[in-house]
Amino acid sequence: MRVDIVSIFPDYFAPLDLSLIGKARGTGLLDLSVHDLRTWTSDVHRTVDDTPYGGGPGMVMRPEPWAAALDAVASPAAQLIVPSPAGRPFTQADAHELAELPHLIFACGRYEGIDQRVLDEAAARMPVREVSLGDYVLFGGEVAVIVIMEAVTRLLPGVLGNADSLTEESHAAGLLEAPVYTKPASWRDRAVPEVLRSGDHGRIARWRRTESLLRTAARRPDMFAAYPPESLDKFDRAA
Ligand SMILES: N#Cc1c(-c2ccc3cc[nH]c3c2)n[nH]c1N
């Protein structure tokens, strides 16, 4: 997968050299380039913003540098991902969709956002997705891109040592994951649930599923409501 990130704060993406993302880059699973938007400015002050038409607070990112940057990094297979508080909620399903794509371009906005014409013009030549991480407001798109990059990269074949991790985790099957435990069997007078130490894999699977359903019902009623009712027949806590 090829990824191009355009930002006025390219140093924000140093964390993408670490951990499994850094390993994916080193092994060639991920071809990641980070670009400074100011590369595509033409004035001595390297200006990327200006006052908003219609008035209002703050500044808006100028179209010209963005157009030149997207022209420089685009490819016939590219999709443009633009983090925005006004975007559609980014979900695990989106992460799976993006992980299948050959080339992602991330546009990191700042200030009050990017001139809308940049997105409209880009949409004439590539798919454009405006996405939001949640109902809160960040300073810009960089943190959102780091989050999205982690969610997507871990789905790439060969990045996670054990692909089985992807099947049981939260949101993988529309449920929150069950509680996890490790040694010691008793810690500060708190024991690991007996079923997990039983060796009975059928019981363990039923217990985990029940705990997932209980957690999802308690913490994410929206997810629980969307869970197929025919799948609830195994709702058996007496695992
Ligand atoms: N994704 C996302 C965002 C943002 C965000 C994204 C881009 C810019 C550019 C200026 N301010 C921004 C905030 N805030 N909250 C989210 N869930």
Image (tube, rainbow, N blue to C red):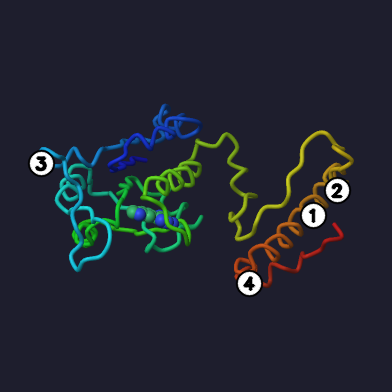
Query: Are circles 1 and 2 on residues that touch, CB within 8 Å?
Result: yes
Q: Which mark is residue 225?
A: 4
Cα gap from disc 4 to disc 3, whole angstroms: 53 Å
N-terminal of the two: label 1 or label 2? 2
- Is residue 221 toward the left or the right of residue 77 in the image? right
Cα gap from disc 1 to disc 4, whole angstroms: 21 Å
Q: Amino acid at mark 1?
A: Trp
Query: What residue is rendered at 34% in x and 36% in y?
Result: 32
Which residue lies under the disc numbered 2?
A: 195
The one of 53 and 75 positioned closer to us in this rendering: 53
Query: What residue is rendered at 34% in x and 45% in y?
Result: 102
Cα gap from disc 1 to disc 2, whole angstroms: 8 Å
Q: Which mark is residue 207?
A: 1
Query: Are circles 4 and 3 on residues that touch, CB within 8 Å?
Result: no
Is the CB–ligand 1 distance for label 2 below 8 Å? no
Which residue lies under the disc numbered 3?
A: 42
Q: Nearer the viewer, mark 4 or mark 2?
A: 4
N-terminal of the two: label 1 or label 3? 3
- Percent x, y for residue 216? 67, 62
Q: Which mark is residue 218?
A: none
SS type, badge 3? loop
The image shows residue 89, relative to residue 79, as above or below, that is: below
- Percent x, y for residue 44? 10, 38
Is the CB–ligand 1 distance for label 3 below 8 Å? no
SS type, badge 4? helix
Question: Where is the C terminus found, in terms of image quarters?
Answer: bottom right
Q: Amino acid at mark 3?
A: Ser
Cα gap from disc 3 to disc 2, whole angstroms: 66 Å
